[in-house]
Image (spheres, rainbow, N blue to C red):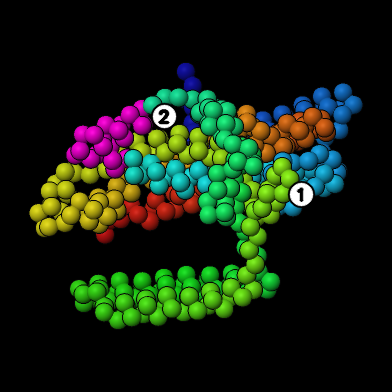
């Protein structure tokens, strides 16, 4: 029978591994190494298979002329531009659609979520059925429904619905007036920044005075009036260099102004309606997480329902709403890829389909598209998590 002795060096090593922080660092390092090895193996295997098939791997194709047209773009584009420009067009179209859905869907979802808590049975039941019906129909079916049943059946351009002869809606899309400046756009940006900052400073000063004195400062009304007059005068001066482009029917279509295709409208409406239903449930759950004593206390001190919502309930419910709301916003960004079904030129449509068919660079293109969605999702998660940290209760 032999006695095993543990050397001081081995004993210290075991002691380090017994520490939670050291063990966690060791596990993270091993996991990170496994992930790196897996990625290296996947790319090495793909490169070997491509080499065996006589195909090259690289992103040099991005500088090659694309040679195809894109139906709608927010930035200048023509077929003589490169695949890199195609990627930018698709990415920008995706972001515009996603952010429009997030903003409008959040507003509608918040209203519907509050309606679900209404004491009026008709209002609450209407909101409930809106959520139940919309949420249980697949988004892809809703997108196709809005495109084929609603937007495709609108009148032709010559019979367009018009709004004061400034905006026109038909089966091709929505035509809107646009404004351009004969001077540098930096002056417009400076005007907007100064107006917003001055209004923010005025609001901040008013709140500080009210917090210290308990009364709303009378001078704030005069300051707000001066701010409004200054903005109107500045706008009047800048309007001398403002030029409007109004859509006008020429031949079989409109020219001038801005154009939103019917595919954008169908995708926007379908995604907004679908996402607002999920957000409504998030808002309802967040509002119900607040103790009923808060409602009773607000009514006791004479708050109206609107004041109770604005000053008592919503500020507290935000703490419970933000985490699940993050998931809804991320899903809205990724759901934009379903617009490919109705021909909207988002990233998947113009880059993962047309570009792959022409270049054959499937691995590179799919990697770029995946990287785009990952970066946008991580950035959005980071910003919302930071905001969530700010609104949470802090001890001490």
Visible in this render: residue 229? yes
The residue that appears at 72% across and 42% down in the rendered structure is 252
List the residue tagged with mark 2.
134
Q: Is mark 1 on a helix, strand or loop?
A: loop
Q: What element carries label 2?
A: helix
Which portion, as a residue range, is magenta? 113-132
Visible in this render: residue 12? no
Viewer-side residue, 251 vs 277: 251
120 within the magenta span: yes
- Precedes in sequence: disc 1 or disc 2: 1
How far from the left and from the top, in percent, is residue 180? 65, 65
Viewer-side residue, 105 vs 250: 250
The image quarter containing residue 32 is: top right
Q: Residue placed farthest to the right in the image?
A: 54
Tell me: 222 left or right of 44. left
How far from the left and from the top, in percent, is residue 292? 16, 43
């Amino acid at each position: 029978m032999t006695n095993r002795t543990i050397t001081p060096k081995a004993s210290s090593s075991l002691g380090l591994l017994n520490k939670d922080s050291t063990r966690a660092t060791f596990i993270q390092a091993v996991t990170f190494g496994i992930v790196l090895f897996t990625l290296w193996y996947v790319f090495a295997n793909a490169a070997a298979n491509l080499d065996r098939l006589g195909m090259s791997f690289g992103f040099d194709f991005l500088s090659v002329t694309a040679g195809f047209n894109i139906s709608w773009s927010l930035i200048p584009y023509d077929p003589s531009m490169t695949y890199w420009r195609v990627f930018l067009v698709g990415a920008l179209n995706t972001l515009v659609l996603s952010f429009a859905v997030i903003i409008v869907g959040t507003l509608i979802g918040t209203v519907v979520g509050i309606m679900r808590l209404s004491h009026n049975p008709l209002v609450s039941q209407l909101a409930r059925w809106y959520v139940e019906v919309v949420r249980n129909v697949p988004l892809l079916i809703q997108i196709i429904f809005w495109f084929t049943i609603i937007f495709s059946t609108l009148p032709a351009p010559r019979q367009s619905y018009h709004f004061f002869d400034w905006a026109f809606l038909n089966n091709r899309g929505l035509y809107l007036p646009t404004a351009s400046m004969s001077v540098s756009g930096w002056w417009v940006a400076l005007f907007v920044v100064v107006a917003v900052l001055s209004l923010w400073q005025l609001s901040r000063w008013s709140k500080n005075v009210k917090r210290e004195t308990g009364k709303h400062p009378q001078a704030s009304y005069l300051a707000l009036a001066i701010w409004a007059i200054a903005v109107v005068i500045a706008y009047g001066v800048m309007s001398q260099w403002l030029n409007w482009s109004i859509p006008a029917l020429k031949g079989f279509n409109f020219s001038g102004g801005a154009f939103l295709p019917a595919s954008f409208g169908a995708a926007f409406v379908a995604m907004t309606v679908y996402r607002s239903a999920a957000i409504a449930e998030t808002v309802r759950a967040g509002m119900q997480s607040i103790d009923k004593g808060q409602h009773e206390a607000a009514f006791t001190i004479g708050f109206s329902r609107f004041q109770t919502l604005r000053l008592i309930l919503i500020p507290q419910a935000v703490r419970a709403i933000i985490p699940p709301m993050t998931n809804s916003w991320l899903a809205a960004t990724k759901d934009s890829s379903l617009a490919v079904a109705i021909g909207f030129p988002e990233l998947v449509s113009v880059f993962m389909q047309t570009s792959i068919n022409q270049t054959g660079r499937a691995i590179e293109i799919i990697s770029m598209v995946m990287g785009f969605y990952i970066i946008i999702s991580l950035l959005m998660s980071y910003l919302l998590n930071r905001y969530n940290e700010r609104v949470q209760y802090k001890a001490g």
